[in-house]
C-alpha cells in the first residue's frame, strides 16, 4: 500500500476562480496508467485534474464559482452553517455540525452565512473519469482500509489524532491533516489507521462501464 501524509500546513491557499473567497487546496489528482490516481504537480494548470479536494474559507455572502462538467460535494467543517440559493429557486441549509450537499459544478448558488465565517470541505470530480464516494465516520480505535487495483482513498481528519499501524516512518495525523492511500496495480491489500476522532473519507474508483 502506498500512503502519503498531507499535512495541513502544506495546503496551498489560493483565490476562488471567481475571486469571491479563498480556498486551501489539499490535493489535486489525475488518472494514472494503473487505474489509480496520482497527485498533480503544483506547476500544472489549475484545471489539470480529475479530482480536487480543498477547504473553502467563507467569510462573507457570495456566489460560488462555476465548474462545468464537474460534480461537487461540500461538507461543513467549522462555523454555524450556510444557506445556498440556487438559480432554480431551491434553498438548501447546510447546518452544524457537519451538514453536506452535493450539486453540479455548473451551478453557481448564492451563499449566505448563517452567523459568521465557515470552513467547508469541498470535493470536486469529473464523473466521466472517476467515481467518488464521500463518507463521514467516527474513528474509535482501529479502522481498516482495503484498496484493490484502481482504488484510492483520501482520509481527512476533522478532529482527534491518528497513526497508521506498522508504518512508523509516517508522521501521525493531527486534526486538519489528510492522507492519500492507494494500492496501484497491486493485489488487494489493507492498511490500518488507529486513533480517535472524526474522519471524512473519499473513495475513488474507475467509473462503471455501460
Image (cartoon, rainbow, N blue to C red):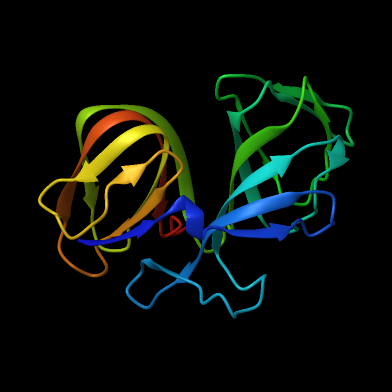
For image coordinates 18% across by 67% down, the residue present is 186
Q: How many numbered marks does the figure carry?
A: 0
Task: Name, please, the residue furthest toward the left.
Answer: 166
Quadrant in the rendering for residue 96: top right
For image coordinates 69% across by 43% down, the residue present is 57
Which is nearer the eye, 116 or 142? 116
Quadrant in the rendering for residue 150: bottom left
* Image x and y of residue 103, in percent: 69, 40
* Image x and y of residue 35, in percent: 36, 69
For image coordinates 36% across by 66% down, the residue present is 36
- For the N terminus, the image quarter is bottom left
* Image x and y of residue 45, in percent: 66, 77
Left or right: residue 203 compared with residue 191: right
Quadrant in the rendering for residue 44: bottom right
Left or right: residue 75 compared with residue 182: right
Left or right: residue 92 compared with residue 39: right
Vertical order, 146 against 36 (above or below): above
Vertical order, 145 against 70 (above or below): above
Vertical order, 43 against 79 (above or below): below
* Image x and y of residue 121, in percent: 58, 41
Left or right: residue 1 compared with residue 160: left
For image coordinates 80% across by 54% down, the residue present is 66
Amino acid at each position: 500500500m502506498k500512503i502519503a501524509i498531507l499535512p495541513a500546513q502544506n495546503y496551498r491557499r489560493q483565490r476562488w476562480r471567481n475571486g469571491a473567497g479563498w480556498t486551501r487546496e489539499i490535493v489535486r489528482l489525475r488518472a494514472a496508467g494503473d487505474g489509480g490516481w496520482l497527485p498533480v504537480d503544483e506547476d500544472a494548470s489549475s484545471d489539470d485534474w480529475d479530482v480536487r479536494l480543498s477547504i473553502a474559507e467563507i467569510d462573507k455572502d457570495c456566489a460560488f464559482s462555476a465548474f462545468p462538467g464537474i460534480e461537487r460535494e461540500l461538507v461543513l467543517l467549522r462555523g454555524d452553517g450556510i444557506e445556498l440559493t440556487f438559480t432554480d429557486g431551491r434553498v438548501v441549509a447546510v447546518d452544524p455540525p457537519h451538514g453536506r450537499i452535493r450539486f453540479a459544478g455548473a451551478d453557481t448558488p448564492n451563499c449566505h452565512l448563517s452567523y459568521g465565517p465557515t470552513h467547508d470541505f469541498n470535493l470536486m470530480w469529473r464523473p466521466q473519469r472517476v467515481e467518488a464516494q464521500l463518507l463521514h465516520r467516527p474513528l474509535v480505535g482501529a479502522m481498516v482500509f482495503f484498496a484493490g487495483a484502481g482504488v484510492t482513498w483520501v482520509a481527512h481528519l476533522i478532529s482527534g489524532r491518528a497513526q497508521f499501524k506498522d508504518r512508523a516512518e509516517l508522521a501521525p495525523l493531527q486534526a486538519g491533516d489528510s492522507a492519500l492511500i492507494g494500492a496501484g496495480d497491486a493485489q488487494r491489500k489493507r492498511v490500518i489507521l488507529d486513533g480517535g476522532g472524526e474522519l471524512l473519507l473519499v473513495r475513488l474508483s474507475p467509473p462503471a462501464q455501460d
